[in-house]
Image (cartoon, rainbow, N blue to C red):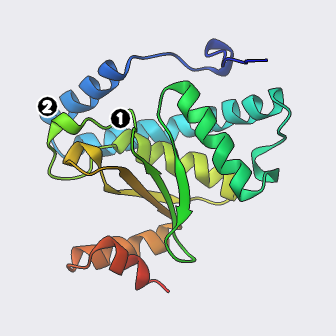
Amino acid sequence: MAHSIDLSANAMVGMTRESLVSLCSSLLREVGPNAAAYLQNAGYVGGGTLFDAFSRWLLARGYGAPEALPALKFAVRATEFFRELGWGSLDLGAAGEAVATVDSSDWAESDPAMGLEFPGCHLTTGLFADFFGRLAGSPLAAMEVECRSMGAERCRFLLASAEVMQHVYDAMGNGLSYDAAVASVE
């Protein structure tokens, strides 16, 4: 039996992909670099509501609570959920022991036509930090290191504790690739 997500019952609204991309693009153009912080904050604030909706979605389908799912089943269910909402597919993995990865080749916030110089899925970084932090049971930081809006084949997000992510960020600022920066954490 097919189930659909009742957006209003989950304190969510539907929005077209074009509207989302236009909003993000307009903010970046009009506000400049500060737009990233505004979008990240908005995503972070919505992460709890989205996690609660995901929990209800799992329970309605008989899958149990998110934190009770084995990692592989969680990855499958999270992809189904985000895809059903129109965000796109997820491929969850790890880059070492301290850093998780979330990849998507079709993420809704990205737009390959934008030609950005830096990753642009700022709303998602905030959303993922809160959403996956709730799953982990402790605060997480998120950073996008590859983005389809820059011409990459996928959007790649790194998730880790704030301390680990600061180390990765600083190492990248000193010229290391993100892979090398993550490897330097171990």
Q: Is residue 70 left or right of residue 99?
A: right
Residue named by callout 2 = 30
Q: Is residue 38 left or right of residue 126?
A: left
Mark 1 vs mark 2: in front: 1
Q: Is residue 88 above or below residue 102?
A: above
Badge 2 local density, few (<14 within 10 Å), some, or many (20+)?
few
Q: Is residue 160 left or right of residue 166?
A: right
Image quadrant where one finds the N terminus = top right
Q: Is residue 86 above or below residue 42?
A: above
Could you tell me which secondary element the residue under label 2 belongs to? Answer: helix
User: Can you give x and y, in whole percent of width and height, for residue 139 in the image?
Assistant: 59, 59
Could you tell me which secondary element the residue under label 1 belongs to? Answer: loop
Q: Nearer the viewer, residue 101 or 80?
A: 80
User: Can you give x and y, in whole percent of width and height, for residue 122 in the image?
Assistant: 34, 44
Q: Is residue 106 above or below residue 158?
A: above
Q: Nearer the viewer, residue 153 or 47?
A: 153
Q: Which amino acid is tagged 2?
A: Glu
Q: Residue 57's image quarter?
A: top right
User: Can you give x and y, in whole percent of width and height, for residue 55 in the image?
Assistant: 74, 36
The residues tagged by marks 1 and 2 sit, at their Cα atoms, a distance apart of 18 Å
Residue named by callout 1 = 109
Give me the residue at 55% from left, 75% from top. Answer: 98
